[in-house]
Amino acid sequence: MKTLSKCILLLCFSAGSITAALAQDHIYSQFFNAPLYLNPSLTGQFEGDIRMNMVYRNQWTGLNGTLSYINASADLNIPRFGGGVGLQFNRSSEGTAFLVKNNIAATYSYSVGADDFVLSFGIQAGFTSRQIDWNKLVFSDQIDNRLGYIPGSISSAQPPDQAHRFYFDPAAGINLVYRNFMAGTAMYHINQPDESFSGAQAKLPRRLTGYASYRIALTQNYTYGADEASYLIPSVVYYKQGNVSSMSAGMQFKHKGLNSGLWYRTAGEGGPDAIVVSLIFDIFTGRENGEKLRLGVSHDATTSKINYTNTNGTTEASVGYQKYFPNSSNYNKFNGLRCYDFY
């Protein structure tokens, strides 16, 4: 009976996904490990010449279907111009892979500022491919009231006019670092592309992202050095897309190569609220050239009506790498804190 309940839960999610539900973007709990997905103005904003990141999200692992998401990015810091260029790839697979979305986008940022602040502007231009496998969908006339899904049954539901969509997808953002404070905002899907398979217009709503962080030093930098000091970093992240909104609020504790975090995320009325725990390890493999390997893991424990017993929560894993190139000048156009000091 429990397995049947999970199947029904997934089917309900899948049915809604075909319309408005899947018109919403997924959200990463480790938003700080997917910087270009959070804001294109964060492109090139790191301590090094090259940076690579990847985050994998496996959502609601207790369900019998698939809800998985990947973000992979690489960007270059061009310090003499105060900005950077980058490339990112996003893939989502939802509902036993019946709906797959692939996106590739180029990003560019430029910064202005002084020793106590840096203001960065970013733009993104990408293309998205969205396709559906109609044969993997399950409809009400394929479900028995007592036994559940009937294997081999064929639905009388009419397939859509097309099973593939391809569209242009731009974004833009801005980020400010002022002393120990950072805030930023970004807008994705600026042109509201049409995602409909049926021919009836179904525009993808714009996604608005806003965030703020404050870094509180627990030790004196002149005693320990920036990489060995301890910090508390409270943060809040807000997302809004169409009539759906979500907010995450929490705090990170950062000490040397260890970064641990505790968050609470709310998704509005009826949304999947969750408590999020994260653990990040920074392995400094070559301090002279700024080489650093980052490994992260986080888990979302669902606290809303879609409870943890049914979903088993959501797990994310991330890996990151950055370094300076040989013979790099390690030059920074602006002194003071940068956005990478907040995660």
Image (spheres, rainbow, N blue to C red):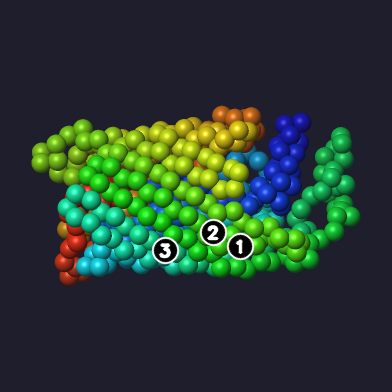
Q: Secondary structure at mark 2?
A: loop
Q: Give the total of numbered labels.
A: 3
Q: Residue at x 53, y 45 (%)?
A: 240
Query: In the picture provided, is 305 more to the left or to the right than 320?
Result: right
Real-space Cα separation, disc 2 to disc 1, in angstroms = 7 Å
Q: Tag 2 or tag 3, which sits nearer the N-term?
A: 3
Could you say where residue 119 lies in the image, as x and y percent from the top left?
29, 55
Which residue corresponds to mark 1?
A: 193
Assign the C terminus to one quadrant of the image: top left
**Three-letter amino acid code of the residue under disc 3:** Ile
Q: Residue at x 59, y 30 (%)?
A: 304
Which residue corresponds to mark 3?
A: 123
Q: Secondary structure at mark 1?
A: loop
Q: Residue at x 30, y 39 (%)?
A: 214
Real-space Cα separation, disc 1 to disc 3, in angstroms = 17 Å
* Residue that protrudes farthest toward the bottom in the picture: 327
Q: Residues within 10 Å of mark 2 (few under 14, many from 20)?
A: many
**Three-letter amino acid code of the residue under disc 2:** His
Which residue corresponds to mark 2?
A: 189
In the image, which disc is placed on residue 288? none
Q: On screen, 42 above or below 279?
A: below
Could you say where residue 49 lies in the image, as x and y percent from the top left?
27, 64
Q: Residues within 10 Å of mark 1 (few under 14, many from 20)?
A: many
Could you say where residue 21 lies in the image, as x and y percent from the top left?
66, 47
Q: Secondary structure at mark 3?
A: strand
